[in-house]
Image: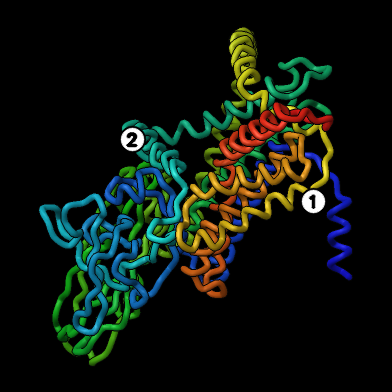
Amino acid sequence: MEMDDLVKKISNYRTSLDIPKVLGNLLLVAMVLILASRAVSYAAGDEAITPVSVVSSGSMEPVMHRGDVIMWTPTPIESINEGDIVVFRSSARDGEVISHRVIEVRERDGRTELITQGDANEYPDQEGPHYPERPITSNNLLGRVVSIGDLPMRIPLIGHLWLGTNQYIGAALANMGGGGLLMLVPLLTAGMMILGTILMLPEKDDDEEGKLKHLILGDDDDKIHPLKVFIILVLAFSLVIIVPSMNSMEEHSISVGVQQEADPAQEQFSRVRPGQTIYGNHSMTNYGVMSTRVYIYSESEQGWMELGEDYTSIDSADSMRVPFSITVPEDTERGTYSFQIKNHYSPFWALYPDGFVTNILEDDPERGALTMDILTVLIFSSLSMGVMIVASLAYDEIVLWKEYYKAKRERIKNKRSRLKDIYIRYTDWLRGVDIVDFDLLPCLKAASVSLIAFPIALLWPDLWLLLLTVPLSAALAYLLGCRWRAEHYTTALIASGITVGAVYMVPLLRAVDPMGQISVLLIGLAIMMIILVMLSPLVLLFSYLTSKSIHSMSESKRPTSHMSDL
């Protein structure tokens, strides 16, 4: 009886279609799923795991292209098979994350090793004319790329935004220098607040000069305005400086086995003799767009470690190695000893003398890093406040700039109107669909034909299935009496959602343990929604052309009295 009631409610349900709202809601849900995925990872203790990577080279073409965003899931090395595409940290490129295919799985000294190669490369990573990688082990394996059949699950093109930011903006910022460049931050912040105050707020009784001076300087009756502005600045800079720094610590675990095998760690030294000194390197990479300062220190109960440097600078998109040594005393007992190398980093420390930073960080690095960030926030907020006060006192110059801005904005508005006319001319088929209320049930019935994508996707998991499911659902919708574009677009969106789910969700569920890797499933759902939004213009156009063709053929044979906007 409950099922009958549900069908009855759906049968009587009428709706309208607002395409921008639907696509916007999909993107919003995708962002919420991404945030939820990170929250689940943190709750599970996997703070360092972000199961999404950007392909930065063409070494895996044609299955993966530069700028693709790929998804991977943490996987034990024992579960990796020949032919899988794996994600690992490079031993030859200072920890760079690489995604290549496994061409050989072998056992050596009781542990599993992987030999990898890019599909477009002539040589394996572990040999050839380039500097060779060490065989991939559990120490530097991150996971396995989620694949649809033999093809990786990916979002094309999106990653170019990240790559372009790092390559071009990062290079420009690096060329401008560290501390000098950072002084532009309060200037830009003050400028944006002035723009918002003078240009964006609605006109009131006060003129612009009065608004700006009242906001920043206050008046005799109300002195709280400067405090409000300063608090806003402090909150804004805290979000930019303090919040990111909470995740700006890296750890490098080292295990030393004295006269025995070492315990699992990122780096292991086994069968070390008392009195022996061992050497190694701590690798660091700056993935940001600005040069950053790094404070390096060690933690251990023994105090045997010495670091080559404790405070250094790394340029944008650059790497470096800090040498370390561990001297085992002569009277050391047989056993395993653990060490950790940690580093805190921030580009904003370039504002201060090196000695000042190291003095604050050396006693308690974590508390010292927070102290440095708070100090930077207060300095930037004070400088921004000073710039705004100067701007309020120099209002005459600002008025001239504002008049120039208005004239320029008029020219831009005229260009926009011409572009708008061109846009309306070529998107007429997409507009005006939200004015009709229609029954949802015929759309659901027509879209249900796309369920055939699930068995087909088991053999041929590819988005080209949309070329089958979308026209089939459009034809069935027409046979069920759908004549409005809104009905056909709704059917197409539902059918494409089912098809994308069939292509992506089935292999994703096969690749992960649903209970153990909820964060990966959430990311997978988010990726499917983003892909659906990216494909929606083509899907809607294809549905419109199919429906219009069927309608034209039907009308040529037997004119109908049904209302239609096809």
Q: Position of residue 296 (x, y in %)?
A: 33, 60
Relative to 160, is 462 above or below? below
Q: How did the renderer colour the structure?
A: rainbow
Quadrant holding the N terminus: bottom right
Relative to 487, is 124 above or below? below
Q: Position of residue 46 (x, y in %)?
A: 49, 68
Outermost left residue: 129
Label 1 sits on a secondary structure element that is: helix
Q: How many marks?
A: 2
Distance Cα–Cα, label 1 vs label 2: 55 Å
What residue is at 65 percent from the left and 51 percent from the top?
29
Question: Which label number is shown at residue 441?
Answer: 1
Label 2 sits on a secondary structure element that is: helix
Q: Residue tagged by mark 2?
A: 171
Q: Which is nearer the eye, 524 or 245?
A: 524
Type of the residue with mark 1:
Leu
Q: Which is nearer the eye, 364 or 136?
A: 136
Give the mark nearest the N terminus, 1 or 2.
2
Q: Which is nearer the eye, 116 or 53?
A: 116
The reply to whether the C-beta atoms of the residues labelled 1 and 2 are less than 8 Å apart is no
Relative to 102, is 215 above or below? above
Type of the residue with mark 2:
Ala
Q: Position of residue 173 (x, y in %)?
A: 37, 34
Q: Position of residue 103 (x, y in %)?
A: 24, 65
Q: Quadrant of residue 24?
A: top right
Q: Is residue 329 visible?
A: no
Outermost front residue: 557
